[in-house]
Amino acid sequence: MDEEHGNVTLRLLGPVSAHLLGRPVMPTAPKQRQTLALLALHAGRVVTKQTLIEELWGDEPPRSFATTLQTYILQLRARLGAAARDRGWARRLLETKHAGYQFNAQLVDTDVAEFQRLVHAGRRAAEAGDPVATSELLGGALGLWQGPALVDVPVGRVLRAEVAALEETRLGALERRIDADLMLGRHADLLGELTMLVARSPMNENFRAQLMTALYRSGRAGYALEVFRQARSVLREELGVEPGPRLQRLHQAILTGDLDAESAWLAS
């Protein structure tokens, strides 16, 4: 951290914000917001000019795109430099590289970086067979989300892909956290959350299987079987397919009264 100026704090997992020394520094102009968001997502790595051009204008950049892009960068630096009362520091924060621009990772703190750090730690805990740490770490990662990523920033081709990748990581972390909670016997506490997740994502078989497991452990085997029947109906109607092997095995285990049915799911 820069001892004199502090770090720029960027929040991207939900409404986007940027603060320096407690003062908001997020620009209001849409293109500048896009530029800042893309640079922040790649803090510590060079974002090429070509990538920025593709994000801002797609296949139809204006004739003056090079000058316009440079103007956006200068305006961002001016805004940050004014907040820090140090233009030189702003140039160290937002560096010009041969192929593009880069946020100095030592001078910015982003919720995305913290989310990814916690997710990696949670995965390691899961691989080590520690469901308590897995649940805590992934719960902390998921708690950083305050809505869809970049929810109030216009997104072009590049940011759209970045948002999709973040959402996939979030869903994977959520599924792994729920698995850990099931291993810890928190099935009753999970019923409301899983019912909502299944309603929102009716074709997600992992959430279906987790809800079936939670219901079965709660002594509600009939409801668990109904969740399977609904899954089969939705998948047949929407995709013309049967539920996958994991869901089929869990369904069969519940039908036969196998007390380890949930373990078959969690270990598969």
Image (cartoon, rainbow, N blue to C red):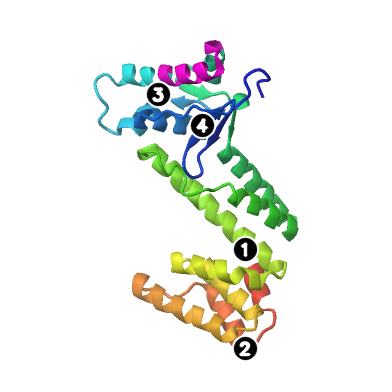
Residue closer to the observer: 51 or 19: 19
Is 79 above or below relative to 130? Answer: above
- Name the mark on residue 10: none
Q: Say whether residue 65 is left or right of residue 209.
A: left
Considering only order in the chain, which callout, 1 or 2, is on the residue closer to the N terminus?
Answer: 1
Q: Say whether residue 209 is left or right of residue 159.
A: right
Considering only order in the chain, which callout, 4 or 2, is on the residue closer to the N terminus?
Answer: 4
The residue identified by callout 4 is 18
- Which residue type does callout 3 highlight? Lys
- Which residue type does callout 1 highlight? Ile
Is 94 a magenta residue? Answer: no
> Disc 3 and disc 2: Cα gap in Å?
61 Å
| Residue at image coords 68%, 57% | 135
Q: Are marks 3 and 2 in contact (CB under 8 Å)?
A: no
The residue identified by callout 1 is 178
Q: Secondary structure at mark 4?
A: strand
Q: Position of residue 162 (x, y in %)?
A: 45, 42
The residue identified by callout 2 is 256
> Disc 2 and disc 1: Cα gap in Å?
25 Å
Neighbour class for label 3 at 10 Å: few (<14), some, many (≥20)? some
Q: What predominant SS class does the magenta segment belong to?
A: helix
The residue identified by callout 3 is 49
Write down the region rendered in magenta.
74-88
Residue closer to the observer: 11 or 83: 83
